[in-house]
Structures are given as structure tokens and as C-alpha cells.
Image (spheres, rainbow, N blue to C red):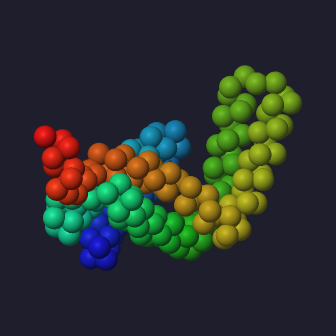
Amino acid sequence: MKKTVLTFGLISGAIAISTMLATLRLEDKIGYDKGYILGYTVIVLSALFIFFGVRSYRENVGGGRMTFGRGFAVGILITLIASACYVGTWEVVYFNFMPGFAEKYAAHMEEQAKASGASQQKIDEKVREARQFKQMYDNPVINVGLTFMEIFPVGLLVTLVSAGILRRKVLTPETRTASA
């Protein structure tokens, strides 16, 4: 299990990391809204390696058989490795190479509120939220948590679906005669 989990977790993490880095370079050109779409699309694509990892485990280690629980365990471990790669890379990039990201994003949030035609009260509320976001995001512990919550839920969902689809019960003599 260890080899399968490490292999597919690192492949998934590498895909998420490389595309995150590529997307960050395009952020000013495509904008935050398109960046979200591109970023989550890539996260979903990298999460496909969870499915491939669970299937590989079933075929190569489980002899074609696997319970939901074992499939979930393999998938969640792959998810955790990919998430750790993604979060670790973001922390290094954010705190060392992107000194103005939180300010730019907060300004974007304010601009969106103003452009939406909302009341001044709503705009002021969004401005407060943007400032709170910047303050929270500059705290490494909160930054790790928020970044983890970008990728982990997608991996969890793919893990649940993969474990459900790929499970195959072991046939015993009693279950063979009962199904015949």
C-alpha cells in the first residue's frame, strides 16, 4: 500500500503544484475569477490520480478485490500526500515570492463589491472582510488551514466515489452458492 500511496500521492501533488505555479503567473492576465475556475479544474484533474491509485491498489495488491474501507484508506492517504505537497508549496511561494498577494486580493474583493452596485453598507462590510482576510492570511497557521481546505474537500469527494465504485467483495464459498 505504501508504494501505491506514495507514487500516486506525489504524482497528484506534482500536477497540482505545477499548475498552481503556472496559474499564479497568469493571475494578472486572466483575473481572479478565471483563475479560480482554472485552479479548481486543475485540482479536480490532479485528483483523478486518487481514482487511478485506488484502482492500482485493487488490481496489484488486492488481487482484483477490495473493500470500501480499504479503498477509502488508500484514497485518503493519497489525498493527504497531494494536499501536503500543495500546501507546502503554497506556503513557500506565498511567504517568500508573493509579498503583495493578500493586498491585491483584498483590493479585488473591494472592487467587486463596488462594481456590484451594492449599498454603501454592503461595500463597507466587504471592505472589512477583505481586511480581515489579509490579516488572517498573513498568519501561517490560518494560511495553511485555508490552503488545505482548497484541495482536501475535492480529494475527499474523489476518494469516496473511487472507493465506492472500485470496491469488490471477496467471494467465499457461501456467497458463491447464495448468488448462484
Q: Quadrant of the N terminus?
A: bottom left
Identify which residue is drawn at 82% across, 38% down: 125
Direction right: furthest residue: 121
Residue 61 drawn above or below residue 22: below
In this picture, residue 180 sits left or right of residue 30: left
Relative image position of residue 111 (x, y in whole percent):
68, 37
Direction bottom: furthest residue: 2
Relative image position of residue 21 (x, y in whole percent):
41, 61
Direction left: furthest residue: 180
User: In front: 171, or 128?
Assistant: 171
User: In front: 160, or 112?
Assistant: 160
In this picture, residue 142 sits left or right of residue 119: left
Relative image position of residue 89 (x, y in whole percent):
47, 70
Determine if residue 140 is in view.
yes
Residue 108 drawn above or below residue 84: above
Identify which residue is drawn at 66% across, 70% down: 140
Identify which residue is drawn at 32% across, 70% down: 5
Determine if residue 75 is in view.
no
In this picture, residue 124 sits left or right of residue 96: right
The total number of labels drawn is 0
Identify which residue is drawn at 64% across, 43% down: 108
Residue 42 drawn above or below residue 124: below
Q: Quadrant of the C terminus?
A: top left
Relative image position of residue 20 (x, y in whole percent):
42, 58
